[in-house]
Amino acid sequence: PTGPVVALSQLELATSPRSVTGETTALLRSADIVPITDSPAQVLPTTVVSRDRAGDSQVKVTSTKRLLGLDISGTIAATIAGLGFGDKLVGRDVSTTFPPAMKLPLVTSGGHTINSEAILALKPSLIITDGTVGPADVLLQLRDAGIPVVFVDREPGLKEAGVLAKAVGTILGASATGALLAERLDADIAAKIAEIASIAPKAQAERLRMLFLYIRGNSGIYYLFGHESGADELITGLGGIDVATQIGWSGMKPMTDEAMVAANPDLILVMTDGIESTGGVTGLLAARPAIALTAAGEHRRFVDMADGEVLGFGPRTADVLDALARAIYTKR
């Protein structure tokens, strides 16, 4: 998007969100991450708890000069940058796509598979991960090779941005900075949700019935995201009704035709690479005819957003909500 920033309330809004037809892409106004400070205060060494599949362990962090943040959504690296340590990142996973990081060497291959040789070549002083990229054995091997590896717990949702900021700040010996970033992110998200509520339909019967569909068409993967997947909180924050949760869908499970028809969403949220992997909306409707039977399928009402942004729940969460709201509620 270009031009001056216009408040959501000043946009030309659709008279009824359900009357809008056709697919739309939600775009961040800027992919940059603005750090809370350029010179975060640190106290090192520090000892933190790492929670991997083998249980809790103590990890001593002595240096943060060469950092890697690895996860399926690129959120850990983004949080490191948000804390003011972006210049310490020495590599990236495929989902870490904010502009400065794009110049860094890629350490994942074949999607989200870690390349141990690429990591060892970078000589990181610390790796922070949540275990969503792997295999986990590779991460444990890197730890055994002498690289400090800290696993963090993550629960997807709108509160996660602040929680992760505090956790990563503590790992980096910058707890005070983590608390400051968390405070800013929580405030920004709350303000954006309130702003969206001011333009979204107030009556329950008029709110958009939304559903998040995860797609990898070339692999035949179609997952519905329901309660406690993070997508439910995103949809609620957008002023919509999460119909997957409404029909009793929990977590992330393979889509069934029966569930899709029962949910009957007005709008379907997807990742950009996911919808492209099916040949766009036309290809998706041809591959899964049950989707064509829904209101969203009939009106081709899909909103896509970049894979590393839409469910990242990191420093750009408020901006993601803003971009999605503009794609959903503006008149076309």
Image (tube, rainbow, N blue to C red):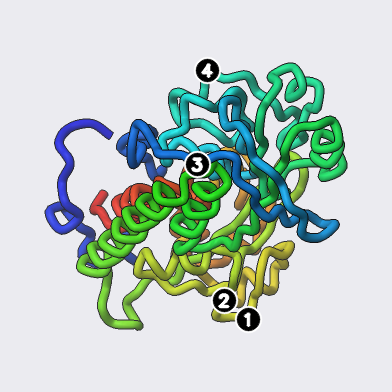
Q: Quadrant of residue 153?
A: bottom right
Find disc 2 in the rendering and name its residue.
Answer: 245
- Name the residue carrying label 4: 103
Q: Residue at x 80, y 37 (%)?
A: 143
Give the quadrant of residue 95: top right
> Which of labels 4 and 1 is toward the front?
4
Q: CA distance from mark 4 to mark 1?
A: 43 Å
The amino acid sitting under disc 2 is Thr
Picture residue at 68% right of the left edge, 64% below the top: 252
Q: Are marks 2 and 1 in contact (CB under 8 Å)?
A: yes
Question: Dot 1: what SS?
Answer: loop
Q: Are marks 3 and 4 in contact (CB under 8 Å)?
A: no
Mark 1: few, some, or many residues within 10 Å (few <14, many ≥20)?
Answer: few
> Quick one: label 3, few (<14), some, or many (20+) residues within 10 Å?
few
Query: What residue is drawn where x is 45% and y is 35%?
Result: 81
Q: Residue at x 24, y 53 (%)?
A: 331
Location of mark 1 (residue):
248
Residue 290 x, y percent position in the rendering: 65, 63
Q: Earlier in the sequence, mark 3 or mark 4?
A: 3
- Alpha carbon separation for disc pair 1 and 3: 47 Å
Question: In the image, which is nearer the foreground, mark 3 or mark 4?
Answer: 3
244 or 149: nearer the viewer: 149
The residue labelled by disc 3 is 43
Residue at the left extreme of this rendering? 10
Q: Nearer the viewer, mark 3 or mark 2?
A: 3
Q: CA distance from mark 3 to mark 2?
A: 43 Å
